[in-house]
Amino acid sequence: MKKYPVVVALLSFFLFILLIACSKDDASFPVGESWVSSDTKVYFIDTVTVESSTFKFDSISVSGADRYLIGAYTDSVFGLTKSKLFAQLSNTIYSIDDDAQFDSIALILNYDNYYYSDTTKLQTFTVHEVLQNIKPEEESFYNTSSYRSDPASIGSITFKPKPIREDSIHLLLNNDFGKTLFNNLQNDVINNSDEFLSAYKGLLIDPEDNNTVVLGFTTNSFLRIYYTLENETEDDEETLDISFSATNTFNNISSEKTGTYFENLAEQQDLLSSKKTNNSSFIQAGTGLATRISIPFIERINDINGHGTILDANLKISLKGNSDMYNLFTRDSLQLYIIDQKNQVLGQLYDYSGANAEGLLTQKNEEFKTINYTIPVQLFLDQKLSQFNGENWHLALYSSNYNTSIDRYILNGEAAKEDLRLKLELTYAVYDEDE
Amino acid sequence: MMKMNKLTAITVILVLFSITVIAQTNTQSNSPYSSYGLGLTNNLSTGKTNALGNAGIAMPSATAINNLNPASMAGIPLKNFMYDFGFKAQSASLSEGAGSETKFNATFSNLAFAFPLSPKSGLGVTLMPYTNVGYTIDGIISDIEGSQDTFLTNIEGSGGLNTLDLNYGYSILPNFRVGVKGSYLFGKIEQTETNIFVNNQLTIHDYNRYNGLQLGGGLQYDFSEKFSLGSIVNLPTSLNGNKHSIVYQLYDDEIVTDEDLADFKLPLELGFGFKGKITDNYTFYVDYRKNFWDATNQSDKLGTYTDQDIYGLGVEFLPNGNPLSYWNAVQYRAGFNYDTGNLTINNEKVNNYALSVGMGLPLNNRNNSTLNLMYSYGQKGQVNNGLIKENYHLITLNLSLNGLWFIKSKFN
């Protein structure tokens, strides 16, 4: 009996499979998508209770700040804000030609382009000798760190600041002070750093309270001694520069809050609810004012029927444009800490990419002068919902450059109108509805 | 003896291969309808009934395993050991409204063996898909409630349940056979739903496992050489299910849950068959089955389970001419099957009809080993009231082998 029909049949079968398997899937038109529904229900929620308030960090670390801040200004909301510079000198030259003649001495303060508030008025800085060793309390200098200084001034300047157009301020000091220093070095009274620091503990550059601007200077500002070296033919003008210590120079930033909203913020745990401050919360760099944001009832999200998960969560907060003063700059990003119920810092706020989460400027309307910031809080909420004690977790919103600026922010609270109000925008998916 | 060893070796390989394939093949269907319940019920069976419009309740397992009625096992001739390996390939074009798409799948469709226990009784074991799940539905757009935004969902399903049938048939009288059947139903249905958002993606993997036992019975009565009647019953049962879910998104930890699923109820099934040999050349088969789904009171998302009627009609032609010609030994078959479906969507039943033609190609002249081929063209559902119409081409191949035991081949 011939077997070939079987072989032919088998071959045809597999050929058929091959043919239809290779035929192109016409997948451009999805069939069934209007017919089957997703099992997942997704909700966009922006009505979760969010509360804001203002508190003040007791002190902020200012060690290693890469900008010197000197100046003062008075703000209609924040009161008088003032930054003084405590500078330790860091000398490296201990020999001067015996024939050299002292001329003068001056502080050269190099502008770094930062300024805050009104530059059109005359400003006055005075310089005093510091009488105590400038060394950090514990590990760090704080904005509140202060050292005793000689009430008598060794120099002052009254000037019209031009922080952008000019390079530096030339602050002439008393010749008596300069000459003594010059002689000490020339006559080998001071031969090394220890001897230098015991004689010259540092300088305090102090702005007057009625100044109208806080100015930023670079850390390569210095003290310069001018002297003359007589030659046989002509005189050589020489200089000797003494830089500021990189570690023991810091900004002392303070404010006078009497008569402002903040006069009763004595302890870090004290809170000033936005409900009591015309639906506003506040941030000020340098002085430690920060906005606290609380989401007190987030665990109620679990009351939504079924198993769910947060897909996206962002806080929206907007700037209140209520200042009649110029040059009160704000930045495009705000920084965040996770804090506890006593406003103690628990850690940085991170987002799911592992990066520090920031409040980023996401919307700026020139016409209506509105600025909105968005803060990613999905990780924060997931942690808050799962961590022991998570109900005591809050967010602290503070200024970037918090130890090298005095930037201030007034933010809208929960009661502002819809597009400006503080709110939490949640995207929540229920993937397994209870039946 | 050489021949026997070779056959045994081939058998062992095929058995192992089929078990692996049946256990691993995921996409056994390509119909959106398979997203409901446990999937699409597998209509294919062993031997030659696929080409006969799935009719054969009254057919004895004389030359090939007939899995439609356990009573047929009593008809296995002594010293026969039967195997059956089934393969299928299907190409379906789905249309809904103005659009359509074509999908293809190929898989094992059954593995069976049967043998006589005594002159009066026989036993058969069949492993085959009970339901098939396979669908990909892309581009479902849903609203994010409380906003103007939407999200996109893609759903993919695969898997299905298998049934391991133990059939026992016994001849009470030479023309009256009874049978009982025990089926162990088991399997896993996987569904992956991917929801795509602007900043995130939520994926839900569900692994639904079911298992359970079903009992059944059957009768076959031969009125004469020419006419036989058969009937079957499958008792209602419940399948236990549990669900293992893994939910994950781009952020946050994955969530793993295990929960029991509500029992899935299988209905009472009754079937009647008639076999008539009109002439020496022609044999007719007519089947009617009814599955009482109403009583299970089950519904699923958009659809409801409702009573199902299945009609099968088949004819087999044997040329019976010169026995020396190969083509005179070939069996030719044709059939028609109409199934009202067990699913009602939008008040429309998802019915199914199929026309089939087939051939049984003898593999040798010493026993009844046959290669059964079948081609069918069918349609499921229709394009109205939001249903999807599927037109499909289906090919099955059943290798029905018959090993004669204890008989030495005189010629090798």
Image (tube, coloured by chain):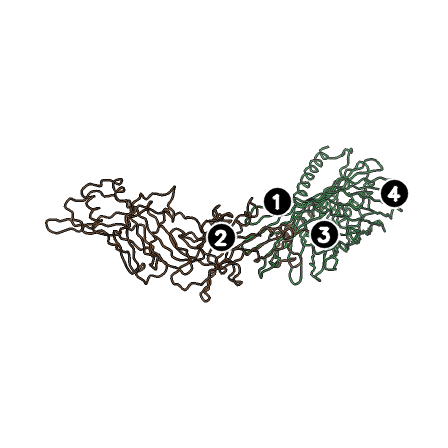
Chain colours: A brown, B green
Q: Of residues A416 and A433, which is closer to you in this image? A: A416
On the picture, is B54 further left or further right than A307? right
From the image, state whether disc 4 or disc 3 is nearer to you.
4
Circles 3 and 2: CB atoms closer than 8 Å: no
Residue A394 coordinates in the image, percent (x, y)? 51, 50
**Dot 4 and dot 3 within a common chain:** yes
Residue position marked by numbered label 4 in the rendering: B176
Circles 3 and 1: CB atoms closer than 8 Å: no
Residue ranking furthest to the bottom: A367
Q: Of residues A90 and B374, which is closer to you in this image? A: A90
Label 3 marks a residue whose chain is B
**Dot 3 and dot 1 within a common chain:** yes
On the picture, is B385 further left or further right than B150? right
Q: Quadrant of residue B306?
A: bottom right
Residue position marked by numbered label 3 in the rendering: B375
Q: CA distance from mark 4 to mark 2?
A: 93 Å
Residue position marked by numbered label 2 in the rendering: A271
**Dot 3 and dot 2 within a common chain:** no
Circles 4 and 3: CB atoms closer than 8 Å: no
Q: Of residues B384 and A368, which is closer to you in this image? A: A368
Callout 2 amino acid = Leu
In which quadrant of the rendered image does the N terminus of chain A lie?
Answer: top right
From the image, state whether disc 3 or disc 1 is nearer to you.
1
**Considering the numbered disc 1 on the image, is that residue within a helix, a strand or a loop?**
strand
Q: CA distance from mark 3 to mark 2?
A: 81 Å
**Considering the numbered disc 3 on the image, is that residue within a helix, a strand or a loop?**
strand
**Dot 4 and dot 2 within a common chain:** no
Q: Quadrant of residue B351?
A: bottom right
